[in-house]
Amino acid sequence: MNRWLTMAGAAGLSLACSPVFAAVNVFACLPEWASLATELGGDKVSVYQASNALQDPHRIEARPSLVARMRSADLAICTGAELEIGWLPVLLQTAGNQKVQPGKPGFIAAAELVDRLEIPTRLDRAEGDIHPAGNPHIQLDPHNVAKVAAVVTQRLQQLDPANAAYYDTRGKDFQGRWQQAIGRWEKEAAPLKGLRIVPYHKNTVYLSHWLGMSEVMYIEPKPGIPPSAGHLSELVVRLQAEPADAVIRTAYQDPKAAAWLSEKTKIPVVELPYTVGGTPAARDLFGLFDDTIARLNKVKK
Amino acid sequence: MFRKNILAAAVATVFVVPASAFAADDAEIKKIREEIETIKDGYETRIRQLEQRLERAEQGAGAARPAALAQSAPASANAFNPAISLILGGQFNNLQRDPQTYQIGGFIPGSDEVGPGRRSFNLGESELDVSANIDPYFSGFFVLAITPQNEASVEEGYVQNTGYIPGVTVKFGRFFSGFGYVNEVHAHAWDFVDLPLVHQAFFGGQLQEEGMQARWLAPTPVFLEFGLETGRGANFPGSERSKNGVNSGMIFAHVGDDVGISNSYRFGASYRVTHAQDRPYDDLDSLGNPVTNTFTGDSKMWGVDFVWKWAPNGNTVDRNFKFQAEYLRRKEDGDLVFDTAGANLSDGYRSSQSGWYMQGTYQFMARWRMGLRYEELDGGDTDIGLVNSGAVTAANFPRLAQNDPKRTTAMIDFSPSEFSRFRLQFARDEARFNEADNQVFLQYIMSLGTHGAHKF
C-alpha cells in the first residue's frame, strides 16, 4: 500500500515538474528563436528547439517528434518568409493546434517584423531557391533581433497575462543589455567595414549589411544549388582577379567546397556559427555575435 | 563617393582645429579631448548611417527593393491566389516481357494500372496541386492527375480542419487512404518509380477513399496518433454498391519519436474492413476462353509499417538514410461466381494472403541517392468452393493458382535542385507465374510552382 502511494506521489510530482506545465509552451523553429524565448520568458516558459545549428534551416524533416511538440505549443516562433516552407506547413497542418496557426497571437513569423533585404524583383526559379518575401536569414543583424524580441515579449504578456509584469521586467532588462552589446559589437567590428567576403550561401546578408562588409561572390552558383567543379574553378579565376579577404562557411554547410577554394586562392576560411550553437562559444544570442565578430576580426589582423 | 569625401574633410577639420589650442591647461585639454572624442564618435556614427543609407539606396536601384515598398503593393483579387504547383513526369521503359501479359500471379487483379507501364517513352501522370486556406476553419487541397491517355482524374480533393478540437484533424472528400505509410505519399515523392507489389496486389495501386478521416494526436512529447477513416469503399478491394451508409471502415495508430539528434522513426498499424459486391475480374477458363468471374464478400486487411530516418546531426542536405518497410495481410471471405456470362456457377471463396517489402535509400552525397528494395508476396491458402466440390476444375482459375511473387529493385537518382530529379531503376520482377521480367526505367520528375512541404 505504502509503495503504491509513494509511486503515485512520485508520478504526480514528476508530472507537476514536467515542462508541459510551465505557463507557456514555446515551439522555436530555429535555435536563435529558442535562445531569445529563453532570454525573455525565463522560467515561465518551456522552450522546445526544433532544429539545431548543424542543420540547414531550409531542409529540416517534418519529424513526428516535431508534430508532437507543435501539438502542445502555445507560441510558435519561426522565421517565416518561406525559410521553413519545406517542413513548417506540415507541422501546422497535422498538429491539430489552432493556437499556433499564422495570424493567431500564438504564431510569430520573425521576418515579417523587420525590413527584409533582397526582395526579388523577378520571381523565377531559374534564379534558384529564392524567397519572394526577401532574404529570410534575418537573425544576424542584432537590430532585427531587438525588433523580434519586442514582439515576443508582447505576445508572452498576451498569452500569459498573469505573468505580464515578469515578462515586462525581463524584456526591458534584455533590451537594455542588448542595446549595450550592439554598441560594443559595432565598436569591435569597426575594422570589418569594407571586408570582402565570399559566403557559401546568401545567409550572412544581414550581417554584412549591418557591419558594412561586401559579399563579392558566393560559392553556390544560385541559392540552394550546390557548386559544381566548373563553378568553383570559375570562382578561383575571379578571385585571382579581384581578391577577397575571407571565404565564409557557416556551421551547417559542407566544409569541402570552402576548404578547396581557400586552398586554391590562399584566402582564409572563416567558420561562422550562423546561429546559437553553431560554435562552442555561441552558447546564446550574445555569444553568437561575440564569436561571429571575434572570428571575422582574426582575418583583419 | 563625393559625399564621403566631404564628410571626411569635415571630420578632419573638427579634429585638427581644436588640437591647435596649445595655451590650455591640463584639465582643459582633457575636457577638450573628451569633447573631440564625443564629436568623433558622433560623426563616425553618422557617417556609418549615411553609408548604410547610401548602400540601401544603391540596392534599391539594383536587384532589391526595400521591404516597405513591396509591402505597400495594392491588394488585388488575385492576391488570394492559392498555392499551385504542377508536377511533370515521364519515363523511358525497357521491359523484357510484353507488359500486356503482366500479372501478379495468384492474386485477384485489382486494376489495369497494375504493372510496369508501357514500353519506350511514356509521359507520366501530370499532376496539378492547388491548395489554400478556405476560411479561418478549413483548408482545401486539390490534386488533379492527367494521364498520358489524356484522361483527367481527381486524385485527391478534400477539405481539412485541424485543431477545432485540440489535437484533432478532420478531412473529408476524396483522399489517399491513411493505410500504412507509402499509400499516402504522392507518386512524385516515391523513392522508386513504382509502388510496392503488395500495394499493387491488394489495392490495385494507391488506395483512394471517398469519405472522411479523423485523427487525434495525443498531447504527449512522443508522437502518438490515432485515426479513423470511413467512406464509400468503392475502390478495390471494395466495389461500387448502391447502398446508403458507408462501405469501409478503418482504424490506425502511429507512434514516432527521435532517437538522439540523428535518428527518428515512425511505427504504424492499420486495420481496414470493406465489402465487395459482384467485384469482377477477367480470367481464362481451362480451354483458354475469356471469362469474367465475380467476388462478393468481406475483405479485411491489416498492416504494420515502419520508417526510420538517419542523417548526421539531423542535417539531411549531404548525407541521409531512410529505411522503410511494410507488411500487409488480407483475408477475403465470401462467394465466387465463375463465368458470369456463361456457366454462372457460385460457391464459397476464402483467401488469406500477405505481402511485404523493405527498402533503403541512401543519399551518399548532395543530390545523389541510391536505393534497394526487396519484396515478396505470399499467395497463401486460397479455398475455392467450386473446386473443392468438384464442380469446376482448378485449371479454370489460372490466375488464382498458387504463386509467391518476388521482386528486387535497385535505383540511383540525381536531383539537380529540390525541384527536379532524374532516376535510373533496374528491377527483376517475378510476379508472373514462373517467369522473370527484367525492367529498366529512366525517369524524370519536375515540379513547377509552389515549394511543396513533405511529410515524414
Image (cartoon, rainbow, N blue to C red):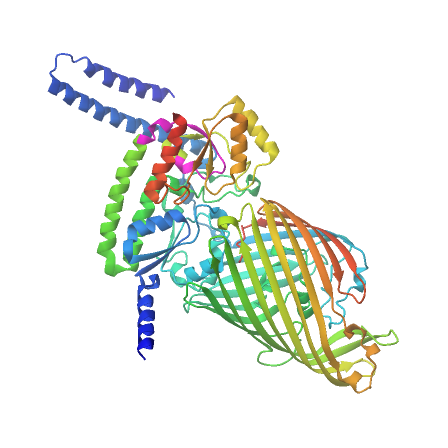
Q: Is residue A163 visible?
A: yes
Residue at the extreme right: B287
Residue placed most toward the observer, B41 or B73: B41
Relative to A133, does residue B118 appear above or below in the rendering?
A: below
Q: Is residue A227 magenta?
A: no
Image point (79%, 81%), residue name: B338
Is residue A212 visible from the viewing direction of this image?
no
Which region of the structure is painted magenta? A188-207
Horizontal relation, residue A206 to residue B113: left or right: left
Q: Position of residue B175 (x, y in %)?
A: 58, 66
Specify the farthest residue to the bottom. B389
Residue A198 falls inside the magenta stretch: yes
Q: Is residue B215 above or below residue A67?
A: below
Give how far across and how far down residue A147 sits, in percent. Answer: 32, 45
Give the camera-side residue of A70 and A154: A70
Q: Is residue B39 above or below residue A183?
A: above
Location of residue A170 in the rendering, given as x and y in whole percent from the top left corner: 25, 50
Q: Residue at x 65, y 66 (%)?
A: B356
Q: Residue at x 31, y 21 (%)?
A: B7
Query: A92 or A55, which is in the foreground?
Result: A55
| The N terminus of chain B, quarter of image | top left
Residue A19, position in %: x, y?
Answer: 34, 61
